[in-house]
Amino acid sequence: MEVAFVFGLSNSFSTFSAVLNYKWSPWIADHYNVTTALWVGAGVCGLSFVAALLLVQIDKKLHIASEKSEAASIRDLKLLGWLFWLLALQSLVNSCIGPFNNTATSVFLERDYFQQPPPLCQRCGLGYYNVYCDAVSPHCPNVPPFAWPLPLLSKNCSITSPFDQFQCSKAPPYILDEDINCDDVSWREGPFTHRYCATKSQAAETSTSSLSYNPMVQTGLAPLAGWLVDLFGKRPMLSLVAEVGVAVAHAAINYSQVTVTVPLLLLGVSQCFLQASMGSAFPPLYAHYDRYIPHVQVLFVGFGVANALLGVALVAMDRAHHGVLSRFSPPRDMDLDHKEPFLEAS
């Protein structure tokens, strides 16, 4: 049986696409805009959908019908023992790692590549940058890992073209990081914000590229990990060791100052063996001649529909709260009577 090896090959191809995503998405967003990057992602999703349709047709041509097919029943759940449910729970917990990878860019950006500098190094025209702001002050930390000083512009600076910045006031209160939309060409190419946006974009690309270490390891190592699992077995022990490795990697990211490359490489190796050992652990629970729940894909369709309904509910709730989740930047004049949507009782 080479189930783990097949899981390894599948994991290798999926993580290779993740590598391309981490490399290309920030480049497209930086050289064009975020909307273009999103449309490219939508196009890739369309290609995936077409591939799924082709796979359905191939499956119809090559499918060998069984002699007897029994209808699914809720009573079939009794066939699944505690070992199955333990594996299912373990898979659920393991799947929680995925969302971390999707949001870790901001974590690495703030921790390793775009840290807030000391107070006297935070703004051009003030502190150690009271005269020049075209180079890093010898009294200030390096850029990166620290952020470039903010421009000396007022918070109410509103522009439609880059050179509108010359018309902005330089009196306090001053502009903050969240007020500078570096995706907008008028800010990205502005005379006072160009250097700040350039260093921030470079830091974002670097932090996103760091995330590719994990899937890059899985792309090359996943088939080998699957082959080793098929060869030696010991799935529970391999799964335990891999889970310890995942925990150590996350602890290193959160509680240590070690370079992010080390825990990400450990995370990639651990996930290779974790997915190979867990993914191939379900088939041995049920012999090929025994009965299993048919049409299991209906369950996943149900999950997809439930997720879509949750998305509709999220859109409706967002509209009910004046589109607070749809804003591309915080409002400049906050309504004092508006309640925070996450804190409302109803």
Image (spheres, helix red, strand yellow):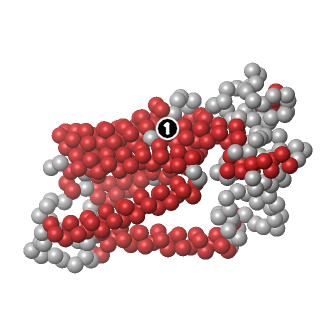
Provide the secondary structure element on which disc 1 rests: helix
Determine whether 110 is above or below 65 in the image: above
In this view, the residue farthest toward the right is 171
How many numbered tags mark residues here?
1
Q: Picture coordinates of residue 233 (x, y %)?
A: 21, 42
Is residue 238 shown above or below 145?
below
Q: As shown in the figure, which amino acid type bears the numbered disc 1?
A: Ser
Check disc 1 and report the residue beneath it.
210
Residue located 48% across and 71% down the image: 308
In the rendered view, tell whether residue 306 sits above or below residue 340. Answer: below
Where on the picture, by quarter, is residue 267?
top left
Can you say which quadrant of the picture contains the C terminus? bottom right
Drawn side of residue 225 relative to residue 25, left or right = left
Above or below, 315 relative to 100 = below
Residue shown at 60%/38% (left/top)?
Answer: 203
Residue 76 position by quadrant: bottom left
Left or right position of 342 against 130: left
Q: Residue at x 19, y 60 (%)?
A: 286
Tell me if I can see residue 29 in this picture: yes
Residue 81 appears left or right of 40: left
Q: Can residue 107 be spotted in the picture?
A: no
Work out which residue is located at the far left of the displayed protein and give it: 67
Left or right of 310 on screen, residue 141: right
Q: Residue at x 70, y 41 (%)?
A: 194
**Residue 296 placement (x, y as % from top left):** 28, 69
Percent x, y for residue 153? Answer: 83, 44
Q: 173 or 43, which is in the foreground?
A: 43
Q: Which of these two is toward me, 181 or 240?
A: 181
Badge 1: how crowded within 10 Å, few (<14), some, or many (20+)?
A: many
